[in-house]
Image (spheres, helix red, strand yellow):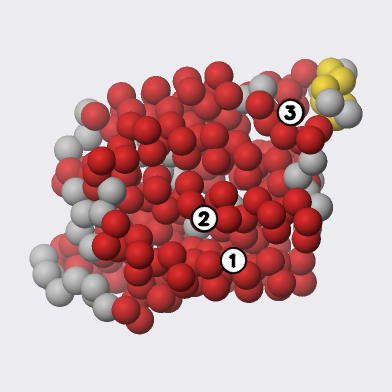
Amino acid sequence: MIELFGYSLTYQSFAFFLIVGILIGMSKTGVHSANMLAVPLLAVIFGGKASSGLMLPVLIMADFFGVKHYHRHAEWRYLWKLFPWAILGILAGTYFGQMIDDQMFRTIMGVIIFVSLVVMVWMEKSNKKNIPDYLWFAALMGIIAGFTTMVGNLAGSAMALYLLSMRMPKNEFIGTAAWFFLCVNVFKVPFHIWVWDTISWQSFALDLLLLPFIAIGAYLGIHIIKKISDNYFRWFIILMTCVAAVFMII
């Protein structure tokens, strides 16, 4: 056993914990939905509620890597549309989050994402150019993203659907998502500390151990994404979002 900051971990659990850092780093620099492997992995090690608090500082550290590399590509006109609704979703998630069964929540979200993906694939195949750049669409995606990021750190799929629908090029997609998640994740911190009581100095100290591994994952993500063209990137994101939906359901 390894004793760290009040946590007792087996060597296997500690190895998985380090892998979580690499996966989160990759997810924040373009390898979308790598965090969908990290979220359940951390939950297995620490339990559902505790893992949500442990995950948040890791996500924020990884967000800084994404923002540093892609910050100049962010499309702020879309972000300003999303932020107010995402805040509303976070507040709702804070209140209702502990009342919802995890599996029911994941199943509902998985089905919604699958239906949305079918529509997106149809648009890609039929070359539809009508982009749903409407306030109601931004509001819907913002609320879903805010709620899901608060309840389960699972907002990546909702954001992917919105940003792909805006037909953003690869770098703009990653840069806009990086800023969005940095802002909303920082906004979530007080709720985890004072409402849910899932972040402490001990948990934060444990998270800091992952910083080098987050950096490794971010480096890997940047170099993987560089090799993917804009067109293939869209299909890569669609595929990874589909994988994310499967993980939600199972």
The residue lying at 20 percent from left, 59 percent from top is 167
The residue lying at 81 percent from left, 33 percent from top is 202
| Residues packed near mark 1 inside 10 Å, few (<14), some (14 to 19) or many (20 plus) | many
SS type, badge 3: helix
Q: Amino acid at mark 1?
A: Ile
| Rendering quarter of residue 69 | top left
Who is closer to the viewer here, 166 or 118?
A: 166
SS type, badge 2: helix
Q: Choose the circle earlier in sequence order: 3 or 1.
A: 1
Establish if 219 lies above or below 203: above
Report whether 69 appears left or right of 186.
left
- Quadrant of the drawing holding the C terminus: bottom right
- Quadrant of the drawing holding the N terminus: top right
Q: Amino acid at mark 3?
A: Leu
Report whether 74 appears left or right of 50.
left
Label 1 and label 2: CA atoms lie apart by: 8 Å
Q: Find residue 27 and report its horizontal and vertical position in percent.
A: 45, 38
| Residues packed near mark 2 inside 10 Å, few (<14), some (14 to 19) or many (20 plus) | some
The residue lying at 68 percent from left, 31 percent from top is 207
Residue at the disc numbered 3: 206
Residue at the disc numbered 2: 184
Establish if 192 lies above or below 121: above
Report whether 177 appears left or right of 200.
left
SS type, badge 1: helix
Residue at the disc numbered 1: 90
Report how many numbered discs are placed on residues in the image: 3
Report whether 165 appears left or right of 143.
left
